[in-house]
Image (cartoon, grey):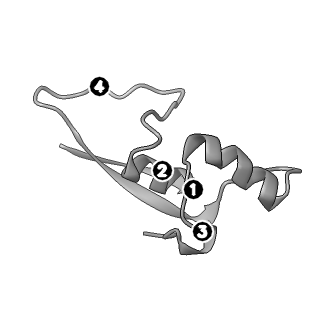
Amino acid sequence: MLSAITLLQPYASAVVHGPKRTENRPWRRKLPPGGLWIAIHAGVGCYDWGDRTEEQAAAEMDGLWPGMPPWEGLPRGV
């Protein structure tokens, strides 16, 4: 069974590359016996950081993903 989830950047890449190990959603998905493959779709948009500047957002992400690639290099819409 294959399921897909859309995540905004930089979280989509953080899940794929490993530094973000969990994704919290209000709904639960029942796992079939034998496991489940999940496709990660990187949305076209980026996460809305509200009033924070790009530098402040980058500092927050450094705690989640030290050495994160530049925002411009993260894939979108794929």
Residue 56 or residue 10, whichever sits in front: 56
Res. 61 visible in picture: yes
Mark positioned earlier in the residue sequence (4 or 1):
1
- Is residue 78 shown above or below 19? below
Q: Quadrant of the N terminus?
A: top left
- Marks 1 and 3, Cα distance to the nearest angstrom? 10 Å
Q: Are marks 1 and 2 in contact (CB under 8 Å)?
A: yes
Q: Which mark is residue 70?
A: 3
Secondary element at tag 2: helix
- Marks 2 and 4, Cα distance to the nearest angstrom? 24 Å
Could you tell me which residue is drawn at 55 percent across and 56 percent down?
A: 67
Q: Quadrant of the C terminus?
A: bottom left
The quadrant in which residue 47 appears is bottom right
**Residue that extends furthest to the front in the rendered view of this protein:** 67
Disc 2: which residue: 14
- Is residue 17 shown above or below 35? below
Q: Amino acid at mark 1?
A: Pro
Q: Are marks 1 and 3 in contact (CB under 8 Å)?
A: no
Could you tell me which residue is drawn at 79 percent across and 58 percent down?
A: 55
**Residue that extends furthest to the right in the rendered view of this protein:** 51
Q: Is residue 40 left or right of residue 23?
A: left
Disc 1: which residue: 10
Of labels 1 and 3, the one closer to you: 3
- Marks 1 and 2, Cα distance to the nearest angstrom? 6 Å
Q: Position of residue 16 (x, y in %)?
A: 38, 52
Disc 4: which residue: 30
Q: Residues within 10 Å of mark 3 (few under 14, many from 20)?
A: few
Could you tell me which residue is drawn at 71 percent across and 54 percent down?
A: 58
Mark positioned earlier in the residue sequence (2 or 3):
2
